[in-house]
Amino acid sequence: GAVALFPVALEACASAGRPGGVETPSMVSYTGTGGRGAMTLTAEAGVGETTLAESPTAVWAVLPAVFRVLGVEATVTDRASGQMGNPGFRPRRIENRRLSLFLDCGSGLTGDYADVYQVDMMLRVEVVSTSPESTTVRTTVDAYAQDRNTSGNPIHCRSRGSLERRVGELVAARLAA
């Protein structure tokens, strides 16, 4: 069936920009036609923030190494907007760890869907200057899982918050090194 993703307004005051200049809200609607009718699901992306007593330039400089440690290719790098990420990739593991440590996609007889289904994921890290001596690292994670053997609708995965925390830890560790 036909599948389309439609952004839905979310934050009243601030919009979350997706790498590459395309807006990615922290709330996403999935509309699919499967079986007898159309279905719309709305789900929120996971957003985590870590504030560090460092300049945005110093934080930006360590982000490529953070992505390498995670094992995620940063396909979009936009220094002007302070965003680095990958808007659509299919990980099997992150930092050589099972996806179910980072995502809750539900589970069934075969185990955690994050570990056994195909997962399509978006990871964006935004460097935000909060004062002359402080920078916030805002990490947004969104993912969908789909059984590789069926043509059903994808399942929205909830972030467990651990990937957002891990990005902050890795940035802090790289800055301290």
Image (cartoon, helix red, strand yellow):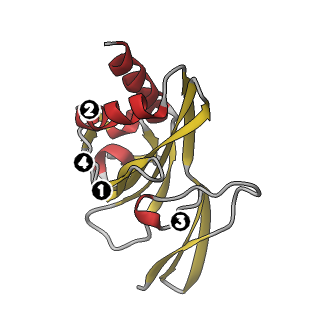
| Quadrant of the image occupied by residue 16 | bottom right
Query: CA separation, marks 1 and 4?
Result: 9 Å
Q: Which residue is mark 3?
A: 23
Query: CA separation, marks 2 and 1?
Result: 18 Å
* Amino acid at pointer 4: Glu
Q: Quadrant of the C terminus?
A: top left
Q: Which residue is mark 4?
A: 73
Residue 148, percent from left and from top:
27, 63
Nearer-N-terminus badge (1/3): 3
The one nearer the camera, 137 or 89, is 137
* Amino acid at pointer 3: Glu
Q: Which mark is residue 89?
A: 1
* Of marks 1 and 4, the one in the foreground: 4
What is the secondary structure assignment of the residue under circle 3? loop
User: Is residue 56 depicted above or below 142 in this figure?
Assistant: above
Nearer-N-terminus badge (1/4): 4
